[in-house]
Image: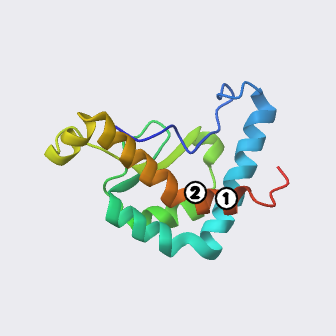
Amino acid sequence: MREGRPWLDFSLGGPDGDGVAGREKALSFFERFQLVLARSWSVDLTRWMASDGAFIQYGDRPPAVDLLPAQAVQWLVNCRDAAQLEWIFVGRWLFLDNPDHQRILGDKAKLAKVADDTMRTLYPLWLDTYRGSDV
């Protein structure tokens, strides 16, 4: 189970319902995210991914558990086909075959704390991405 919804939905039928305009806006935000990540956040995101069991997921693939955190961050920075992938997610994953994750998923308070910790940790990255953005 991944926490939250995809980072950005690049599909024409995305959640904002704006079709092509919404897709272009999402792609612009993703490009800004890539710049912020490459310039100042790659080390911090790599550390967080390693310590919190975070993965990327994109298109119709399962979570990319085969990528080490540094490889996943580089994949994000270098991704040039986001529109074809339709969506990209980066976040913490909870797997049902992991007993510790089962305990979190079975306890609403623990699950809420994990989600809150994730949001609080990544908020500065999102803030840097959206701050000063002209999209």
Q: Residue 58: which numbered mark, if any?
A: none
How many numbered callouts?
2
Q: Name the residue type under label 1.
A: Leu
Query: Considering only vertical position in the picture, is 100 above or below 45?
Result: above
Q: Secondary structure at mark 2?
A: helix
Q: Mark 2 belongs to which amino acid?
A: Tyr
Give the Cα separation between the discs numbered 2 and 1.
Answer: 6 Å
Of residues 27 and 124, the one drawn nearer to the viewer in this rendering: 124
Which residue is pictured at 76% across the width and 59% down the height?
131
Residue at label 1? 127
Q: How busy is the neighbourhood of tag 2: few (under 14 within 10 Å), some, or many (20 plus)?
A: few
Residue at the location (39% across, 53% down)? 55
Q: In front: 69, or 53? A: 53
Judge the density around disc 1: few (<14), some (14-19), many (≥20) Cα neighbours within 10 Å.
few
**Residue 88 falls in image quadrant:** top right
Q: Are marks 2 and 1 in contact (CB under 8 Å)?
A: yes
Is 26 on the left or on the right of 50, as rendered?
A: right
| Residue at screen point 31% across, 34% down | 108
Image position, residue 100 (x, y; %): 18, 47
Q: In the image, residue 26 lies at what x, y percent?
A: 71, 43
